[in-house]
Image: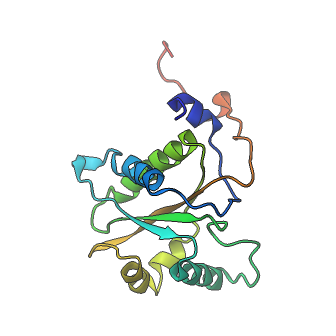
């Protein structure tokens, strides 16, 4: 596995995957990385649903996303045909679940990079997942009672590569301390 700093520097969004399935041990490692993320008040409320890329429910989510966005001919589906999609849900009444899910999904993305895998953090299905089919999708994805979609991540072996984005410290950072 890559050193953490290297994984952070080299990770980028992957929008093309081979169809090679992830080994169970690899998937377990990624799920554990997500569940080991810190949560507010140590609530540990994040739930992960693992779906094979061929699961029909993913096509239904895609269709609903496209319907809501009035997209008739998308260039690809929301998970770019990745062989695995993890969908994170959280307690809909806990104010910090969105933040906790974001931390968990970043842990997963960095673990994937460390293992030589590609990942794509997915928020574009939010409207579909929280819209009029919210309960249907929650049931189909086996979310715990009172949980709702927070974020998703596509995972697999990279078929394409992309350079990580450049950072601009002068533009994106303000230091209030004289010592920084």
Given residues 175 and 84, the one toward you in this image is 84
From the top left corner, tell me how far across and down residue 164 is, in percent. 69, 40
On screen, residue 19 versus residue 55, left or right, reads: right
> Against 92, is 175 above or below?
above
Compared with 118, 151 (above or below) is below
Q: Quadrant of residue 59?
A: bottom right
- What's the residue at 72%, 71% (across, down)? 76
Which one is in front, 55 or 99? 55
Residue 176 placed where, x, y %? 49, 23
Q: Where is residue 40 in the image (x, y as percent from the top left)?
A: 28, 48
Total count of labels: 0
Q: Nearer the viewer, residue 174 or 94?
A: 94
Which residue extends farthest top? 179
Residue 87 position (above or below residue 146) = above
> Could you say which quadrant of the image residue 31 lies in?
bottom left
Q: In the image, what residue occupies the spot 59% across and 30% down?
A: 6
Q: Measuring from the top left, give residue 70's x and y in whole percent.
A: 69, 84
71 with respect to 120 (left or right): right
Task: State whether residue 148 is above or below residue 134.
Answer: above
């Amino acid at each position: 596995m890559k050193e953490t700093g290297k994984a952070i520097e080299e990770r980028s969004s992957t929008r093309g995957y081979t169809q090679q399935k992830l080994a169970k041990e690899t998937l377990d490692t990624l799920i554990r990385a997500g569940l080991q993320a810190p949560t507010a008040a140590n609530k540990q409320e994040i739930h992960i649903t693992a779906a094979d890329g061929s699961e029909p429910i993913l096509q239904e989510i895609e269709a609903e996303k496209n319907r809501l966005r009035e997209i008739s001919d998308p260039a690809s589906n929301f998970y770019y045909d990745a062989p695995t999609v993890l969908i994170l849900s959280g307690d809909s009444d806990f104010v910090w679940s969105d933040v906790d899910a974001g931390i968990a999904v970043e842990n997963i993305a960095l673990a994937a990079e460390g293992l030589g895998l590609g990942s794509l953090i997915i928020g574009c299905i939010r409207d579909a997942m929280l819209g009029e089919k919210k309960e249907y999708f929650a049931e189909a994805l086996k979310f715990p009672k009172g949980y709702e979609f927070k974020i998703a991540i596509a995972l697999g072996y990279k078929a394409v590569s992309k350079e990580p984005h450049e950072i601009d410290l002068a533009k994106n950072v303000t230091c209030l301390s004289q010592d920084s």
